[in-house]
Amino acid sequence: MHEKLRAHIEKIVPLTDEEFAFVSSYFTEKHYKKREFLIQRGENVRYVYFVLSGLLMLGHNDEAGKHHIVSFALEDWWETDFLAYHTQTKATFSLQCLEPTHVLCLSSENYQKLCAGLQKMEHFFLAKANSGHISSQQRILSFLTSNATERYEQLLRRYPALLQRVPKTLIASYLGVSRETLSRLSS
Amino acid sequence: MHEKLRAHIEKIVPLTDEEFAFVSSYFTEKHYKKREFLIQRGENVRYVYFVLSGLLMLGHNDEAGKHHIVSFALEDWWETDFLAYHTQTKATFSLQCLEPTHVLCLSSENYQKLCAGLQKMEHFFLAKANSGHISSQQRILSFLTSNATERYEQLLRRYPALLQRVPKTLIASYLGVSRETLSRLSS
DNA sequence: GTGAAGTTGTGATGTTTGTCACACAAAGAA
DNA sequence: TTCTTTGTGTGACAAACATCACAACTTCAC
């Protein structure tokens, strides 16, 4: 069951069959349809989601009604509103499906129990949190150093498949430019 | 010794005297002068630094020779080039003193040993990594949703003391605008 | 104290990007 | 099918911001 999760975890820490059975018991499985919300602003955030297949976007609506995308979540990604999840506060982000999506759900109580019960998993989540922090810093750097064209090229290089999977309007929301400007980027 | 570090860790996990002595033994202490570099681009990154007093900036120089500031590190902050530190690669960021700065240094070998030897510390670093990830996402969001004036106001609200301590040129490098534009921001 | 380096403000001007408007094509529902 | 929604490109114009140039002031090393 969920060999994909096991392979993903074992990239960082090896697990025995018993250990993986223990880990696995904390997760629940769920399917979402295109456009369905996993998290909506203002709600409690019970779960962090591991994406088995499909595609999610983590976004935020500003006062002017514009939607901004903080992150896309592809296969093998962990995604949630981390602030709300870890501090038991209401969501400020939304998490929505761009495709039919198959996820594993881990509640914050189970996250605590899993970390306390198996140090390997705390180690695993530490590695994940560190790499999440690092990627966010890279994205900050790209806002500081690059214009719209360069940020678009960086996105293309890093996730070439994404362009075939999401409308350009959403790519623009992720890059921080208007869809018209994105449509006019030459290169 | 280093009661400041102890108080900082104990905001998240309580420690016995023996445990803190154990933790403490992994750190070395160092003083840096204003303008000195703790990390320079291209070098190996041996340490993560805990700031006891003073002020650091984590930055990056682009091809055009411009300097961009990813983060300021005040008292009680942990800072390093996390990518280079965790993956044993060469630094792409620089870390430099803006004031005379007193730090505790933790090598990556000692970081591993500390986490392996005391689960509380792995738990502590997990909490820190999560909050680092969360703040970086907030900063990404502010680039997506806010213009220069708004980002400046957010910085003022969050770190009001910073303006008295760093030249505006550096504030501009952090906000991602030219120093002239910053100087003209009305509010 | 003196010169050099760093800091800050401001005008003039050009570039990048956003906004509004419109047209048209593609995809999905009844 | 037909209708509606969604996605995309492009022109015209306005706003935000960068760049260059210059002046004045402060800080600091010698």
Image (spheres, coloured by chain):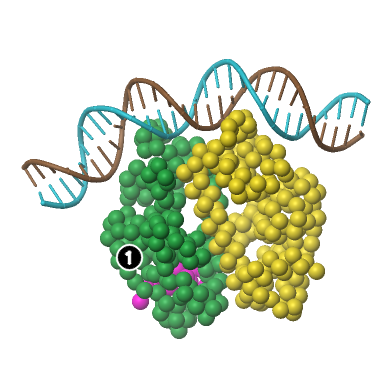
Chain colours: A green, B yellow, C cyan, D brown
SS category of the residue bearing label 1 = strand
Any part of residue B146 in sight: yes
Q: Is residue B159 above or below residue A13?
A: above
Q: How many marks?
A: 1
- Residue A10: in magenta span: yes
Where is residue B112? Give x, y as percent.
Answer: 65, 70
Disc 1: which residue: A102
Quadrant of the image containing the N terminus of chain B: bottom right
In reply to whether residue A81 is colored magenta, the answer given is no
Q: Amino acid at mark 1?
A: His
Tell me if B138 is positioned left or right of B157 in this view. left
Residues in magenta?
A1-14
Between B106 and A82, the residue placed more toward the observer is A82
Q: Is residue A55 left or right of residue B113?
A: left
Vertical placement of residue B136 versus B170, above or below: below
* Residue under the image location 44 percent in, 53 percent down: A71
